[in-house]
Image (spheres, rainbow, N blue to C red):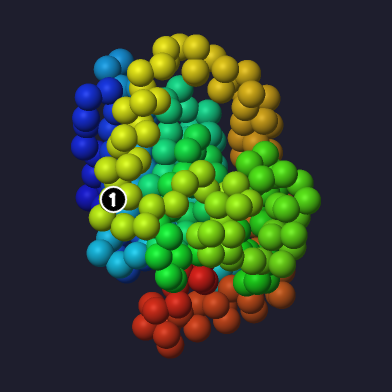
Amino acid sequence: MAQFISTQKRQGYAIISIAKEPVNSFDTAMWQALHAALQAVETDSSMRGVIITSGLQRDIFTAGNDLKELYAPLTSAQQYAIFWEAQSRCLVGIHSSRLATAAAIRGACPAGGCAISLCCDMRLMTAGAGGAIGLNEVALGIPVPKYWAGVMVQVIGHAAAERLLLSGSMVPPKAALQLGLVDELVDDKAQLLPRAEELMQQAVKLPGGARAATKAGLRGDFDEAWLQYALTWEAGPRGFARITDPNTVASVGAAIQRLSKGGGKKQPQSKL
């Protein structure tokens, strides 16, 4: 899966590009590959920032998890534990990174894609039609992971996050900007990455140690609790029991069936 993720290094920062057709869906290997790419940048002392973006031609950041990883008839307790650990270590790694982090979001950004972007320090998004962002799991009949919801609460506040999470809503770019889900909109998608690089160049001029220590103070306790919860609860028997619930099996199975019939056109709205 590493071939779907590439890294380009600039002066002081790197660009990690995700390009797995058709919608950058994430299985275990993809989460592991993204985490490995991030760690490779972090261990390079010359690097002080990273931008995560999509390398797809279509306007999709990442649709998030491959539903087959969440469909009980197609997985096992052991595989589910491996998947959940890979996913959680990657997301916590982004959220806790010493680097300045930015998500350059072109088009749709549902569910797991939204989780990746929320874990970044900065989020830029294209303003064009068709773009939307949100943790839309409830609309699929799947609970929003506890600490994914917690990150959204940190970013936009409890009341706004609760409205979005409980309704399974995806919001368009202008609404996302107003809510604080994204920090800036870019009208021309060709300028998305250049603008992200411009902001990153400013960010990496700041003293990196001071920024990293401040981030650790703000997020350290949360990240430690997140990883512990993910590894002991969500990756454990109780987490697997949740996806074997008949209602969840039916909901995820129906979503997979819709995707297979739709030829992938609606996949961005149908992932976790």
Q: Nearer the viewer, residue 70 or 174?
A: 174
Element carrying mark 1: helix
Where is residue 90? Give x, y as percent.
47, 40
Q: Is residue 50 visible?
A: no
Q: Which of 97 and 258 is in front in this view?
A: 97
**Residue at 71% from the left image edge and 67% from the top image edge:** 167
Q: In the image as oriented, which residue stretches furthest toward the front? A: 187
**Residue at 65% from the left image edge and 36% from the top image edge:** 226
Amino acid carrying label 1: it is Gln
- Looking at the image, is 250 positioned above or below residue 129? below
How packed mark 1 is, by other alpha carbons closer than 10 Å (few <14, some 14-19, many 20 or more), is: few
**Residue at 51% from the left image edge and 71% from the top image edge:** 269
Where is residue 164? Give x, y as percent.
69, 60
Q: Quadrant of the C terminus?
A: bottom right
**Residue at 63% from the left image edge and 41% from the top image edge:** 155
Q: Which picture quadrant has residue 98?
A: top left
Residue that label 1 marks: 191
Q: Which picture quadrant has residue 265?
A: bottom left
Q: Is residue 98 left or right of residue 136?
A: left
Q: Nearer the viewer, residue 214 or 130?
A: 130
Where is residue 63? Give x, y as percent.
45, 62
Q: In the image as oriented, which residue stretches furthest toward the right? A: 159
- Looking at the image, is 25 positioned above or below residue 104? below
